[in-house]
Image (cartoon, rainbow, N blue to C red):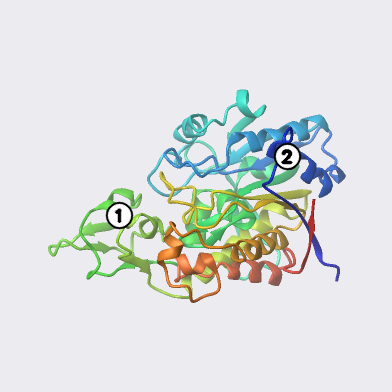
Amino acid sequence: MAKSKVFWTDMRCTVGESLLVKLERLIKKAGIGDIDFNNKYVAIKIHFGEPGNLAFLRPNWAKVVADYVKSRGGMPFLTDCNTLYVGRRNQALNHMAAAFENGYSPLSTGCHNIIADGLKGTDDVEVPVAGGVYCKTARIGRAIMDADIIISLNHFKGHECASFGGALKNLGMGSGSRAGKMIMHNEGKPQVNASSCKGCKTCINWCAQGAILLGTDKKARIDHAKCAGCGRCIGVCNYNAISNSSGGSFDVLNAKIAEYSKAVVDGRPNFHINIINQVSPYCDCHGENDAAIIPDIGIFAGFDPVALDQACLDAANAAPVIATSILSERAQKHGDHFRNVHPSTDGKTQIAHGVKIGLGSADYELIKM
């Protein structure tokens, strides 16, 4: 079998050439023009960023993609689904306001925003997962499934539950409705290490399920009967007092992410772009971002989301550690920058499961522009 082609360019720019120009050149080189966009609805799956976070992709990137689609006769829209956790994106009105606050408006991107699973996150479609092991069907935001073509535009960064987030994370978890996100997360039930807990109540304030309470000993307790397993408490704890209670649960989560990704792309043209810059250790769902853990690397694109994520993971792991980052403070024992930050999860299970179910290939040919 031929290796999947992944095209990339670095972040260097000569005078008179911007990164936005390089992005357009790269996606053309990678073959996006082979897709027939004429009179087609095109969902550009993106993460609008939680307000307060400054590492999310700027709308300038999205405008390049939207403008190209329009130049080919397509009808693009930017889209994401609502979140499970407390924040500014857990229902469509707040989600749209957050997107506007972060610069995503028709005036800046040249296309509209659509929250794919509707006002309350209940507008979804049950989609078959061909070859699914954990999910035979996936609950995907309706607007994403209504599109004729799917393009994912992804910020490649760390993630507290998935180890890293790239094309598969944006496609799979990001396209799941609130019900779909519950299904993906429900294998993981975090627990509190009482000796490390400071009783600060941060996790309580961020739990959308009301599953965390403070005990008489002023230590947090998680009610697993109420817990959705979203892992938000893990990410917001400043004292590393919360972790996944089962080492295998995050593996299941990552596998489900791959299965949901397959549900999204199966049966229609799809194309994927990863941008490795401002590589924060946590998801852009956070209302803040820690310092980047590695230097900016470049822009990657291709038709195979599995190969794309594998190429980006390899490139990221080959990059030096930034000395002022959280990564420099963690034990370097896994040979994987993201797992060194989040030892309880291994993002390679996303890729391995994607290969297993026929979503894509981990073998790639890297072509530099």
Give above or below for 169 relative to 46. Answer: below
Which secondary structure lies at badge 1? helix
Relative image position of residue 36 (x, y in whole percent): 85, 40
Q: Which residue in the protein does label 2 denote?
A: 14
Q: Which residue in the protein does label 1 denote?
A: 203
Tag 2: residue type? Answer: Thr
Q: Residue at x 53, y 66 (%)?
A: 337
Which secondary structure lies at badge 2? loop
CA separation, marks 2 and 1?
Answer: 46 Å
127 on left or right of 344: right
Give above or below for 73 relative to 49. Answer: above
* Label drawn at residue 218: none
For the residue pair 54 and 143, the one nearer the viewer reads as 54
Q: Residue at x 60, y 34 (%)?
A: 59
Relative image position of residue 195 (x, y in whole percent): 22, 70
Residue ranking furthest to the top: 107
Relative image position of residue 211 (x, y in whole percent): 30, 57
335 on left or right of 203: right
Q: Are marks 2 and 1 in contact (CB under 8 Å)?
A: no
Q: Earlier in the sequence, mark 2 or mark 1?
A: 2
Give the number of the mark in front: 2 or 1: 2
Task: Name the image quarter holding residue 39.
Answer: top right
Q: Quadrant of the N terminus?
A: bottom right
For the residue pair 196 and 149, the one nearer the viewer reads as 196
Task: Name the image quarter holding residue 328.
Answer: bottom left
Q: Residue at x 59, y 70 (%)?
A: 349
Tag 1: residue type? Answer: Cys
187 on left or right of 81: left
Residue ranking furthest to the front: 15
244 on left or right of 14: left
For the residue pair 181 and 136, the one nearer the viewer reads as 181
